[in-house]
Image (spheres, rainbow, N blue to C red):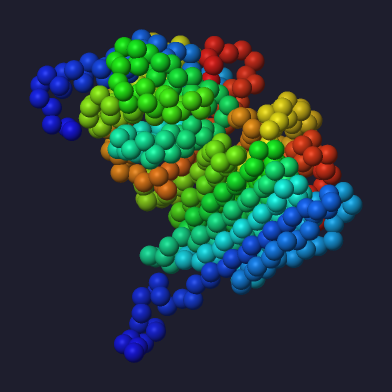
Amino acid sequence: MLLAEPALLPSVSAHQRVNGATRIEFSATGGKTRLADLYQRAPCRVLFPDIDPGEPVQAVLLTTSGGLTGGDRLRVDFAAHAGARATLTSQAAEKIYRALPGDEPARIDVCITAGVGAHVEYLAQETILFDGARLRRQLDANLAPGACLLATESLVLGRRAMGESLRSGFIHDAWRIRRGGRLIFADALHLDGLHFDGSLAALRAAPFGFGATTAYATLIYAADDAPALLTPVRTRLDEAEVSTIVHATTREHLLILRLLADDAAELRQALIRAAGIVRSLAAGLSERLPQVWYC
Amino acid sequence: MSKDNSNAGFTGMTKLLAWTSPSYPTGAFSYSHGLEWAVEAGDVRDVATLIDYIDAVLARGGGWIDAVLFARAYECAHDATAFDEIADLAAAFRGSAETALESHQQGAAFLAVTRKAWPHAQLDAFTERRGDAPVAHSIAMALACAAHDIPREPALSAWLHAVAANLVSAGVRLVPLGQTDGQIATARLASRIAAIAAEALDMPLDELGTAAPLLELCSIRHETQYTRLFRS
C-alpha cells in the first residue's frame, strides 16, 4: 500500500538507481585467447572490436546510461585464465554527475583476476567528476605469480576547458593488488571536503595538494620483473618531453607512474605516451593504445 | 587499560619516551620523507613552509596513513589474524620506493631492538608469523605499545610527534634553519598533532587514503635528485 505520493517521498528513494554489472572471462588454448564467459547487465555493455595483428584480444566497456550519479553502482569482473592475453578498455570517459544531498556516492568496483602467465591490460579512459559528484571506486587485482598486469585509471576534477571545477563532493579511489594472495600494493586517494574546512576546493588548494592541476592518473605495471623497467621507462619519458608531471617509482614486483596535469586533454596526451612506452617495453606491444583512445 | 596506577603510568611513559626518541636506533635521522626534494625545489624555504610540509605529511600524506593504521592495529593487537591483515595493508600502503624503504627499515630495526630491550611474547610471536614480509614502522610501534599496556591516545600522539620532530630536524639541516626556529615549528605543530590524532582514532579503514599528490611527487623526485644527504 502506497502511503505517500512518489513526489512526496525523500529524494533518495524518488530516483531510479542504476545497478550495472559485467563479467568477462578469457581463457587460452593452444596459445590462442578466446572468450570463455560473458555476462552483462544494463547499463554495462561489452564490445569486442577487431584488433591489429599481434595485439591481445580486446574487450571494450560501455556504460549506456551516459554517466552515473549518487547511489548508482557498476561492477566489472574481468578474468584472464592461465596464459591468456587480453586488454580491457572503455569506450569513452565515464561521467559522474552531482549527487543529491544524502545520496550514497556512485560506486564502481573493478575486479581483475590473472592466472599463471596471463597478460592483462586494463586501460580505462578518464573519469570526469562534475561539481558535487560523489564517487567511491575500487580496483582489486588478484595476480597469480608470473602474471602481468598493466592498469591505469584517471580522474578529472572538473573540465577546466569548459569552465567547470569540482569544488564540492567526495572521492575515494582505491587500489589493491595481490600477487599469489599477498597484498603488494595498497593505495587510495581520499578527498572528503567535509573533513577539511567543509570544502573539497580547500583540500585541493592546500599546500602539497593538487596545486593548479586538475587531472590525476595512476599507471601500474605489476610483474615479476617490473622494477627492471624503471630506468628504461624514465629514459623514454625524458625523451618524450611531455610537459605534464609524470613520475615513476617502484616497489617489489611493481612499476608505479603518477601523472598530474593542468587539464584533461594534457593528461590524456601524457597518459597515452606513458602507457604506450610501458606496454612496448613490458610486452613488446605497439605503443599505440586501443583505437577507442583516439576517437 | 587507560586506568594507570602511578607506577604503571610512569613505566609506560619511560618506554614511550625511549621508543620515540631520536636516539632510538632505527636510523630515523637518515630519512626526510621527500623533504630534501621539497627544499631543493624551493617549496620549503622557511619555518612557515616547513610547517606546511609536515602538516601535509601528518594530515593528508604518509603520516596520516600511518596514524590511522596505528590506531586500527593497536585495537586488535590481541587478535593475530586481524592484526596481521592490518600489518599487510600497512606494508603495502606506500606510494614510492623510498618511503617504503623508510618505513620497512625502521620497522625491522624497531622490532629487533625492542624485542631485546623490552622483550614481550607478543613481539616474538608477531616476528615469527611475519617471516620475511616487511613490517611498517607504525605497526611495530603500535604492537609494542599495546603489548606493554601503554594507552592508545598518548601512544599515537607520541608517534605523530616523533614523525614531526624527525622532519623538523631534517628541515633544520636542509633549509637550513636555526635550532630555535626548529623548536618554533615543533611547538606550532603540537596543537595540530592533537587534532590529527583524535581524528585518526575514529577513522575506519575504508576511509583510509591520502589527499596530497604533490607531496608524494617530492618523494619520487628525490629518487633521482643529484646530491642527497638523506635516504628518502
Toward the bottom, the furthest residue is A1
Q: Which residue is drawn at 47% across and 65% down?
A: A70
- Check the image and report above or below for A175 versus A290: above
Q: Would residue A2 be found to the left or right of residue B224 on screen? A: left
Q: Position of residue B30 (x, y in %)?
A: 48, 13
- Check the image and report above or below for A211 versus A171: above
Q: Camera-side residue: B110 or A114?
A: A114
Q: Position of residue A122 (x, y in %)?
A: 68, 50
Q: Position of residue B87 (x, y in %)?
A: 43, 33
The quadrant where residue B61 appears = top left
Image quadrant containing the N terminus of chain A: bottom left
Q: Residue at x 56, y 41 (%)?
A: A181
Q: Residue at x 88, y 54 (%)?
A: A52
Image quadrant containing the C terminus of chain A: bottom right
Toward the left, the furthest residue is B5
Q: Camera-side residue: A171 or A111?
A: A111
